[in-house]
Amino acid sequence: MQFMQLDFDIENKIIIIRLLASLMLRRHICKKQTGETDLIFSTLVRVIEFADQPELMIQNMKDLILNNDYYPTDDEFLTHLLKYEFKGKSEDRARALLEYYNSTFGNQLNEMQIANASEVHLEHIIPQTITGQAALREYGNWQEYLGENAIARHKTYVSRIGNLTLLSSKLNIIISNDPFEDKKTGYEISNISIANALINYPEFKFEQVEQRSVQISEAIIQYWRID
């Protein structure tokens, strides 16, 4: 990337990376056309003419991004993020967002930061599978626990950001499909703040997914934005 080849100090390079990451994350979540990406970057690269004045160059980049339709607003970003389904390749993006969220939450609780991402799994609080006799026999009746229209609503809510947390690979394997009360035993001994905080929920159903999605999304919007 041409911007990274500039003779800037590390602080200014980080600012540029944050600007571009915020733009592309918002566009991805809002499902903007990927075909516009080349046009966007061909427009942004023009600011390199101010490379000898890093602060001016960065300000011009911000202005170009904010004054064009290809930057989703906070409201648009929030609307899409609340209902975005993080599954398949998008699970890596969910991990990155939750790692950021955990860092802010962790600072507040004076908890350990995530050190080794390879040892951390993406955990679905309401399990990905709630049907079938094997699931019922081994893990409890999640369908009954979740209430009316559980199967249909499960498909809508299971991959939302509010139903996801980070958990050590060992704990995730042990508690993956357990009833929520049993899962809380694993969350309680976790040193990952956002998992540990789940013990404060008396129950965890679709309403809690919605509430937690708002909480996480509002924090994400404040960080991944361009002012």
Image (cartoon, grey):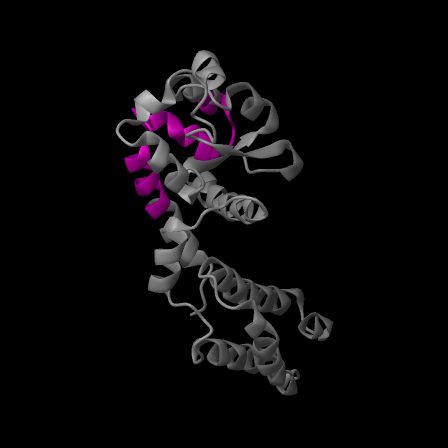
Asked whether residue 202 is drawn in magenta, I would say yes
How far across and how far down the image is residue 26, in percent?
Answer: 47, 62
How far across and how far down the image is residue 210, in percent?
Answer: 32, 42
Q: Looking at the rendering, in which quadrant would you find the C terminus?
A: bottom left
Q: Is residue 95 left or right of residue 48?
A: left
Residue depicted at 49% across the width and 64% down the height: 27
In front: 136, or 224?
Answer: 136
Q: Is residue 184 left or right of residue 207?
A: right
In front: 137, or 215?
Answer: 137
Q: Looking at the rendering, in which quadrant would you find the N terminus?
A: bottom right
How far across and how far down the image is residue 3, in percent?
Answer: 67, 73
Residue 111 seen: no
How far across and how far down the image is residue 15, in percent?
Answer: 57, 67
Residue 68 seen: yes
Q: Residue furthest top?
A: 137
Magenta: predominant secondary structure element? Answer: helix
Residue depicted at 66% across the width and 65% down the height: 10
Q: What stretch of residues is rendered in magenta?
A: 187-214
Q: For residue 61, which quarter of the picture?
A: bottom right
In front: 84, or 171?
Answer: 84
Q: Is residue 48 left or right of residue 186?
A: right
Task: Look at the picture and state if 44 lies above or below 110.
Answer: below
Q: Is residue 164 left or right of residue 174?
A: left
Asked whether residue 200 is drawn in magenta, I would say yes
Task: Look at the picture and state if 215 lies above or below 10.
Answer: above
